[in-house]
């Protein structure tokens, strides 16, 4: 089996929930031979990070054990991406534990603060922006610092969203944060290209992870539909006839991390089955 990422180390934030995008990305990169650093909040820090919506340390360890079966090194480290010092410590851990930092995937995000515009509090707005946009900036910066110092290039990939291209009701902070990632990669890529570092987004449409299932229930209720009808209507507007799967996003991330994608940077790649054409 081809192992195009053998010998490289990949950090994936927000990778501590079973069935989530982060887990799928970590597994896919491991299958390509990369050593993996799993990371998630680990334990609830405040009202914005409830246990039911974050990756717990115990769950991270279970995911790590499963990924080791791919024959790669795997470690796990808790990190709240809102805290710059913790993000820096995560980057240091990757180098200390695995000898290098070659790939950084910013997957951590809040997609569960969903409210009508007139009801959003300042605290809720800041929580989403702090994780989805500022936390991603911290990750880009920490990864780039070590990649530049190592002089071996690197890959930085952010998991954005269809919401980076289009607006959605009841998701003002989320949509704003994901739109911000488009500007972030465009700017960062112009600075890091000379170092052989690419910076890109992947923009999946809806994926029914644990968070996605919660969103299905929320929006089905808002629209007065059963979940079954809501999902049927969703599939009908997607040219490929189905919502996204975690593997769809993971495959796109894996491609952007390979040498074959070395001339692709500053892009926001749609992974939406044709639903998002922008």
Image (cartoon, helix red, strand yellow):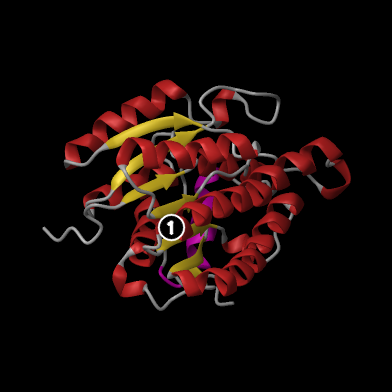
* Residue 167 sits above or below residue 8 on the image: below
* Residue 206 sits above or below residue 269 on the image: above
Residue 239: within the magenta? yes
Name the spot of residue 139 as percent of width and height, x first: 55, 49
Query: Could you say which is closer to the camera, residue 158 or residue 251?
Result: 158
- Residue drawn at x 50%, y 69% as measured from the top left: 270
**Which quadrant would the C terminus be assigned to in this image?**
bottom right
Name the spot of residue 214 as percent of width and height, x first: 56, 38
* Residue 110 sits above or below residue 277 on the image: above
Q: Which residues are magenta?
A: 227-240
Main SS type for the magenta part?
A: helix
* Residue 99 sits above or below residue 4 on the image: above
- Residue drawn at x 68%, y 63% as measured from the top left: 179
Q: Note whether residue 66 is visible.
A: yes
Query: Could you say which is closer to the camera, residue 87 or residue 241?
Result: 87
Residue 262: within the magenta? no
Side (left or right) of 56 relative to 127? left
Residue situated furthest right in the rendering: 118
Q: Secondary structure at mark 1?
A: loop
Name the spot of residue 238 as percent of width and height, x first: 49, 68
Q: Which residue is mark 1?
A: 244
Query: Could you say which is closer to the camera, residue 216 or residue 228?
Result: 216
């Amino acid at each position: 089996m081809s192992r195009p990422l053998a010998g490289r180390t990949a950090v994936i934030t927000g990778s501590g929930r079973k069935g989530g995008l982060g887990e799928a990305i970590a597994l896919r990169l491991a299958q390509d031979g990369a050593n993996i650093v799993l990371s998630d909040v680990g334990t609830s820090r405040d009202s914005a990070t409830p246990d039911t919506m974050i990756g717990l340390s115990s769950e991270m360890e279970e995911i790590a054990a499963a990924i080791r079966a791919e024959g790669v090194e795997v470690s796990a480290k808790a990190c709240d991406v809102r805290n710059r010092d913790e993000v820096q410590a995560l980057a240091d851990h990757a180098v200390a534990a695995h000898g290098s930092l070659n790939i950084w995937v910013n997957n951590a995000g809040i997609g569960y603060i969903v409210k009508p515009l007139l009801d959003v509090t300042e605290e809720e707005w800041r929580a989403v922006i702090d994780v989805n946009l500022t936390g991603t900036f911290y990750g880009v910066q920490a990864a780039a610092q070590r990649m530049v110092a190592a002089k071996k290039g690197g890959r930085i990939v952010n998991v954005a969203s269809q919401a980076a291209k289009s607006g959605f009701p009841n998701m003002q902070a989320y949509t704003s944060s994901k739109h911000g990632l488009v500007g972030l990669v465009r700017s960062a890529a112009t600075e890091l290209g000379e170092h052989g570092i690419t910076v890109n987004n992947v923009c999946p449409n809806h994926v029914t992870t644990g968070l996605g299932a919660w969103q299905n229930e929320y929006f089905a209720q808002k629209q007065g539909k059963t979940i079954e009808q809501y999902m049927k209507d969703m599939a009908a507007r997607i040219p490929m006839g189905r919502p996204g799967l975690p593997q769809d996003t993971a495959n796109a991330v894996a491609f952007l991390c390979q040498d074959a994608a070395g001339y692709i940077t500053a892009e926001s790649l749609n992974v939406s089955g044709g639903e998002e054409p922008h």
